[in-house]
Image (cartoon, rainbow, N blue to C red):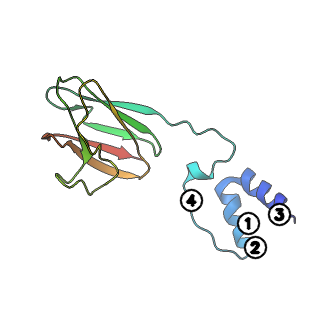
């Protein structure tokens, strides 16, 4: 069987085809995310909005898919700073941290590339809390 034929069959068969080909060839394999295994299809990732109101993040809990983006915007006249817990060190998901105050006329976006349940806060007003669940 030629290499191109193996690649073609693995692509057409998706993850199961890739694993089967690796087993038949005696190689090792790793389980990869289904989205990474999709070949030739355009990934359609969504952008979600979280608003910072006078009293809270809205919505307080948001469910997104791996690779989706969340845009944080404010309805307040003051700066905000979204960051993962724990306050003040933001180490639960260190990349999920604006790392600076965002002025009221700007927004901040973050693309989630780690699955899990990520609680976060407004670093400038830590009683503002939220959760992003990445599936």
Q: Residue at x 42, y 38 (%)?
A: 69
Residue 120 in the image: state x and y as whole percent. Answer: 24, 45
Q: Secondary structure under badge 2? A: loop
Between the C-alphas of marks 2 and 1, the distance is: 6 Å
42 versus 90 height, above or below: above
87 versus 20 height, above or below: above
Q: Earlier in the sequence, mark 3 or mark 4?
A: 3
Q: Is residue 92 left or right of residue 125?
A: right
Residue 130 in the image: state x and y as whole percent. Answer: 23, 40
Q: Which mark is residue 25?
A: 2
Between the C-alphas of marks 1 and 4, the distance is: 15 Å
Q: Residues within 10 Å of mark 1 (few under 14, many from 20)?
A: some
Q: Nearer the viewer, residue 114 or 88?
A: 88
Residue 86 in the image: state x and y as whole percent. Answer: 20, 54
In contact (CB < 8 Å): disc 2 and disc 1: yes
Q: Earlier in the sequence, mark 4 or mark 2?
A: 2
Q: Residue at x 41, y 52 (%)?
A: 115
Residue receiving disc 4 = 32
Q: Secondary structure under badge 4? A: loop
69 versus 85 height, above or below: above
Q: Earlier in the sequence, mark 3 or mark 1?
A: 3
Q: Secondary structure under badge 1? A: helix
Q: Residues within 10 Å of mark 2 (few under 14, many from 20)?
A: few
Residue 13 in the image: state x and y as whole percent. Answer: 72, 54
Count of marks overlaid on the render: 4
Q: Which mark is residue 3?
A: 3
Q: Nearer the viewer, mark 3 or mark 1?
A: 3
Q: Which mark is residue 21?
A: 1
């Amino acid at each position: 069987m030629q290499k191109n034929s193996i690649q073609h069959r693995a692509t057409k068969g998706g993850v199961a085809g890739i694993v089967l080909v690796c087993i038949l060839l005696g190689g090792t394999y790793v389980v990869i995310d289904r989205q990474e295994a999709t070949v030739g299809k355009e990934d359609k990732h969504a952008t979600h909005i979280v608003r910072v109101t006078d009293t809270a993040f809205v919505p307080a809990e948001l469910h997104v898919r791996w690779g989706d983006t969340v845009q944080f915007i404010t309805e307040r006249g003051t700066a905000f700073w979204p960051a993962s817990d724990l306050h003040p060190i933001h180490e639960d998901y260190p990349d999920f941290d604006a790392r600076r105050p965002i002025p009221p006329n700007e927004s901040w976006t973050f693309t989630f590339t780690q699955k899990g349940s990520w609680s976060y806060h407004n670093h400038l007003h830590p009683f503002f809390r939220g959760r992003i669940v990445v599936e």
